[in-house]
Each structure stands twice: as C-alpha cells, then as structure tokens.
Image (cartoon, rainbow, N blue to C red):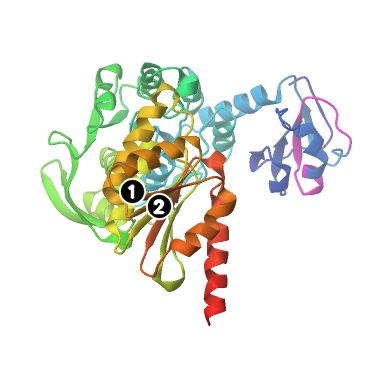
Amino acid sequence: MLRGRGGTDRVFERAIIDSREARPGDLFVALPGERTDGHNHAAAAVAAGATGCLLGRIVEGTEAASRFYVDDPLLALQTLGAAWRSALTGLDVVGVTGNVGKTTTKLIVAQLLAPRYRVQVNPLNYNNEISVPLCLLELRPESERAVIEHGMYTTGEIALLCRWTRPRVGVVLNVGPVHLERAGSMEAIVQAKRELIEALPADGHAILNADDPLVAAMAPSTAAPVTTFGTAEGARVRGHAVESQGARGFDFTLDIDGEQRRVHVPLPGAHLLSNVLAGIAVAHVDGVPLDDITGAVERLDVPLRLEIVALTEDITLLDDTYNANPASMNAALDLLSELTGRHVALLGDMLELGDESARAHQKVGERAGAELDLLFTIGDLGARIGEVAATAGVTTRHLASKDEAATVLAQRLEPGDAILIKGSNALHLETVVRDLILALNAALEERS
C-alpha cells in the first residue's frame, strides 16, 4: 500500500469489483479494464453503501469510505486474498478443474461434504486471477472446507491460483479442446490442468477421472495419494448400470471400496454421473460416512446451466444457451434423446476450438444425425453441423440469423416435441429462447 486516507478501523465482509453489487461492509476494488475503468464507478459504489475503496488514484465522491491507495489494485486484491487464505489455518480447500463441468461439480462436492463439515462455496463460476481472490476474501474463519474452481486459458495460470488457494484436495474432471485457440495445443491444456495436482501436499488427495486417459495419466505428477472415479472397471469410485429417468434424473449402481449401493440422482442427464462420482470421491477420502454421502446425493439441489422448461402444448425446451463445446453439446444431445416425442434442435457455433474446430463440428453433426428428427443451425460453424447431419437423413435448415429463429421454430414445432437450443455464449441464443416463448404464447392466444 502506498498510503491510506480517512476513516476509522473497519472490518470488511467481502471485496467487490462491480459497483452495482455494493452494500455496507464491502471493499470496492477499482480495476482498470479494457471496456471500463473501475475508478469511474468508485463513487457510485460508496453511494450504494461500500465502506472501503482500494484505488490506484484519488477519486472524488469516495470520502465517506476508508480509502487505500496502491500502484496496482489487481495485485493488491490478489495479495489480500492470498494473505487471508493463509490466515485460515483450519480450512482445507478443494480445487476443481476441467474443461467441462467445474461449476456443477463444485456445487455437488460442497453438498456432499456438508453432512460432516462447515463448507463454503461461491455459486458463481469464479475461477480466474480476478475472481478467485474475490472468492478467498469471502471465506469465514469458522469454515472448515472451501470448494473453489481453478480455470485457465494457458499454462501457468492454475499454478498461480494454487499459490493463493493452497488446495489440499484437487479434482481433475476432464481435458478437452476448450480454449484451444488461446492455449495453443492439447499438450498445453494437459500441462495446465496438471498444475492443480502438482500443487497438492503429500497428505492431500488427487481425485482423477479414470475414464479420461489424459487425466488418468496425470497420476505420477502428484505427491498426493490418487483416488480415481468413473465407469472404468479399475476406478476406486465406480458408477455403472445407469438407468435414465428423463427429466427426473437417473439411477446408478455405486461401487466403492468393496461396497455396492443403488443410488438415485435427482438431476436430469446421465452425463452428470461423472460429476457426481467426483463429488462422492472427494467426500469419501475426506471421511464423510457412505450413508451420509449417498443420502446427500439423493437430495442434490444444484442449479444447472441446462434448464428444462415446459412450453405450451406439451412442448419441452432444453435451454442450454450459456455456452457450447464438444463435450457439453454431446451431453445435451444425450439428455434430449432420453425425452419422449420428436427430437428437435437449434445448434450454433462452438467457438475457441482452434485447429480442432472443423473436426469437432463434424463429430457433433454425426451425433445430431443419429439423434434428431429435425435440426436447425445458425452460424458459419453451425452450418457444418447441419451439413453432416443431413447426410444421415435428418431434415435440416440453416438460419441466416437468430432474428428469424423464433418465428421459424414456432411454426415448425408440434405438440409433444422436445427441443434443444444450444451454442456458444457469443451467439446470445438466450434471446431466441425468450422470443420463442413469446411466439408460442401469442400463437396459443390467437387460437383460444
């Protein structure tokens, strides 16, 4: 800190970077950014109740708050987060990484640890050099476990996060071509994900996916004991005999250290088995009794990015517009295939796949060709999905823009249909979902 000004001693409840979230007890950190400078919003944060500001320069309108002036507000935020975590000597951190499913797994892990420990978890996808320090500064002295995502775009980033979080347990879910354009190669992504288990202490636990060869091969890279999970025969925490219950979830048989249980998961999509098994593995190595673990699994209440919405005339919508990559696209198609009725989809581009892009869109097209009755596509890359699916005999139509999508879909959907809408976040297909709901409701009103 260069210098401090004003105010009496204060205890801050958390740090924030968005002035719109400010409330009493907050420390507002003014981060300069590409689109906006946090210093321009510091006065608004104080007006909204923030009781402290971490600033790189003097800002008028912040006089009511305690002000701390530093050369680099981001570095100061990171230093504060790391220092606070180091002070919490009674806390163990569970780090979660993977290209798909980090947030869902993080929330599952927290709920399965809860029968035995006081657990803290941020429900948002806080996983980078800005949001992880914010997450650390939310931790409470009474917490015994914290579950934190560790994300990356390139090598070195997870290692840096681990220096701040000091994880004792590390979960690696999967490795895929997500962010391949930025990482440069699959080898770089593997190396980056491996940094989590390389940071674990010898008395920690590495939790690795036995079904992903790239993850399973990481075992020699950690000093911690390794526990594997998956459907593979050799997995210590194994799930098999999966039976889908559609939107109600799925059942599976759990094998763990010689015990076998039949378990119900109240979350839609059997693709979530891997996430659930990872959570079971963490809770098991951390001493949660098996009865408590399976009971918590059957009570899981996790908000999923994929939402199932009942539209008019018995039409079921799978809204998975948050983002898209090959694994999540296939998982969404899996869930769609488990529903009754005609299977319809609007699929868009999967971005940031680099050299893997053409092959990935072709593979999704092949899968769509095997699962769908009717396919609409959007975007240049999405068009490739439709071209491949059409060779399998699926009726396809490429839409020039999302502006026409809702109208076209409303005209083509029939009672009993199930429709999936999915694409990368940059496409903003959530607007299609909104407009489709409006169009279907309007059509229903006209007929009534």
Q: What is the quadrant of the N terminus in the image?
A: top right
Task: Answer left or right for 370 relative to 422.
Answer: left
> In the rendered image of this protein, does residue 243 appear above or below residue 154?
below
In the rendered image, residue 233, in percent from the top left (x then y), is placed at 12, 36
**Residue 177 can be seen, yes or no:** no
Q: Amino acid at mark 2?
A: Ala
Secondary element at tag 1 = helix
The answer to whether residue 383 is left or right of residue 49 is: left
Q: Which residue is mark 1?
A: 333
Q: Is residue 25 above or below residue 301?
A: above
Indicate yes or no whether the magenta region holds residue 48. Answer: yes
Q: Is residue 223 above or below residue 8?
A: above
In which quarter of the view is residue 308 placed?
bottom left
Give 204 or 350, whichever is nearer the viewer: 350
The magenta segment: 45-60
Q: What residue occupies the far bottom of the structure in this picture?
A: 448
Q: 298 or 439, which lies in front?
A: 439
Q: Work out how far the residue at label 2 is from the one at label 1, CA to CA, in angstroms.
A: 9 Å
> Where's residue 340, x and y in %?
29, 63
Report the amino acid beneath label 1.
Leu
Q: Which residue is labeled 2 in the image?
A: 345
Mark 2 vs 1: CB contact within 8 A: yes
